[in-house]
Image (spheres, rainbow, N blue to C red):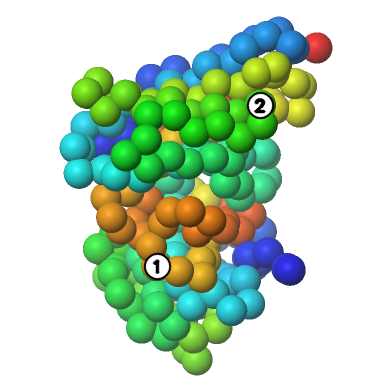
Amino acid sequence: DQQVKQNSPSLSVQEGRISILNCDYTNSMFDYFLWYKKYPAEGPTFLISISSIKDKNEDGRFTVFLNKSAKHLSLHIVPSQPGDSAVYFCAASASSYKLIFGSGTRLLVRP
Amino acid sequence: EAGVTQFPSHSVIEKGQTVTLRCDPISGHDNLYWYRRVMGKEIKFLLHFVKESKQDESGMPNNRFLAERTGGTYSTLKVQPAELEDSGVYFCASSRSTFLGGQETQYFGPGTRLLVL
């Protein structure tokens, strides 16, 4: 049973608009969440993270929001750029080195 | 600083053959992990080394998979004999610390794409 779910396999947005990628989890023991970005033929690259004691973390154009009561997190990219087109993975850990990943969402930013 | 490297980038073998994947972590990273992504699904944890010691191999699918990290530097993952369901992308990652948070994260290699025919 998947503990981290990304229910949208793909998302397409116009350049300059906001991209919102969603992730749901089931394990209430998760205390750290990460987003990784993956280009074709490359490994996942760390993008941004958030601890369960926070509800928002911001880094430039990227903001991650955490709603613990809903067991939901989201990644906002504003403004979206064509270079942001990639597969985005949500991952979680429970005070552990072991990352539990979602299945990824493919983002396409149209020029 | 050089990143995590993996060899080969691709491997196509027949069912029943043996394949060995190699991972070179970032220099100075004691922690090394293997993950696998099968058929576009989620990336799944396989195992974790601290230096040359296996700390957790709970994600290893079965005893056809053998991981080693002699000397605590590079690691190999051998699949013997390979089965069709072993096809996928095998990622290696490394980190300085075991614990995540702050500036600590896992750095991934480009992966080895394994196809078993």
Residue at screen point 40% across, 78% down: B50
In the displayed orientation, state which residue is furthest to the bottom.
B71
For the point 39% across and 75% down, which residue is it? B49
Residue sitting at 57 percent across and 46 percent down?
A: A46
Discs 2/1, front: 2
User: Where is residue B31 drawn, in percent x and y?
Assistant: 46, 72
- In this rendering, is residue B11 above or below B54? above
Q: Is residue B70 left or right of residue B83?
A: right
What's the amino acid at mark 1?
Thr
- Answer with left or right where residue B38 lies relative to residue A36: left
Q: Are marks 2 and 1 in contact (CB under 8 Å)?
A: no
Up/down of A108 relative to B80, above or below:
above
**Amino acid type at image mark 2:** Arg
Residue tagged 1? B98
Please name the residue shown 41% across and 57% down the image.
B100
Image height of A65 relative to A96, above or below: above
> For the residue carrying disc 1, how many other residues have a C-alpha within 10 Å: few (<14), some (14-19), or many (20+)?
many
Q: Pointer 2: residues within 10 angstroms few (<14), some, or many (20+)?
A: few
Front residue of A51/A33: it is A51
The reply to whether residue B33 is in sight is: yes
User: Circle 2 sits on which residue?
Assistant: A61
Q: Which mark is residue A58?
A: none
